[in-house]
Amino acid sequence: MLYIHKLSDLNPKSAEIESVPFVRGMNMSDSFPFTQKKVSEVFAECIVSDDDTALIERALNLLGPVLAKLGEFLARNDPVHEPVDLKRTMECLKSLALPLANNLQYGREVIALQQEFIGKAAGLLNAIPTLCTAEEKLRVNAEISAYFEKVLRSKGFSFSHQGIIFEAHTGMVRDLAESFRNGYLFHVTLEEELKKATFADIKKRIPAERLKEAEDISASINLIGEGVDQAYRLNMRMVLWAVIFYSCIKLATSR
């Protein structure tokens, strides 16, 4: 997509702009009337699989053990650690639990819904040019609206990211992972700050077992980040789904 770059960018105007190349491409490939095979091809980029939800679930399952380990560090009260950093890390990770759980459920619902959609979409779209009565139009419009509402989590033509993963979460985890690469969690002395010491210098005085613990936490945070990113990509794929479905409706309506 050229103009939609984040979840909140989807609206009727942006969908109309994005639909132009999609409609042109479908016209060139003689997509109409649609077949189930053609629908599968057109929406191929939007398909959500069990592999997607598995990554999200893995991230969700890692949160508990990582938080427990950070809690141990805090209770240990080891001067090598910076308590403020420990607490901030825990708060960041805690804030991911509900959005990840909700996104996992949403992903599973999408997997089930897309199977139904692929089976019904061709008939639904091909019926649009043949609609004559107000009752027929209302029935088809209700079916179409129901799909948009379920996928976009909204009654309006916009994607509701409330309660699931969105840009703030991906940015937060990215920043946290970067901080760990730079020695986050470890206390920096005043002398080290004045000398602008790098983590490469600071780590020389840190016991090997403490460095290993931090490396393990860092590795887990990277895996959590992969799950968060996958959840976000899943959500963006549903925005793409909405644009493509909008384009298919536009194509059918022009017949």
Image (cartoon, helix red, strand yellow):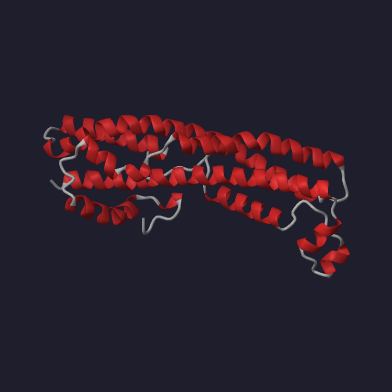
Which quadrant holds residue 128?
Answer: top left
Q: Is residue 123 left or right of residue 197?
A: left
Q: Residue furthest bottom?
A: 195
Front-lying residue, 76 or 205: 205
In this view, 113 is above or below 231: above
Which quadrant holds residue 66?
Answer: top right
Question: Would you say residue 113 is visible in this rendering?
Answer: yes
Residue that appears at 39% across and 50% down: 10
Residue 193 drawn at (x, y percent): 82, 65
Residue 219 drawn at (x, y percent): 66, 46
Front-lying residue, 234 or 255: 234
Residue 29 drawn at (x, y percent): 18, 50
Residue that appears at 71% across and 43% down: 90
- How many labels, in total? 0
Q: Is residue 90 left or right of residue 130?
A: right
Residue that appears at 84% across and 54% down: 206
Question: Would you say residue 142 is visible in this rendering?
Answer: no
Location of the N terminus (image quadrant) = bottom left
Front-lying residue, 12 or 254: 254
Which quadrant holds residue 184?
Answer: bottom right
Q: Is residue 191 left or right of residue 40?
A: right
Residue 167 drawn at (x, y percent): 53, 50
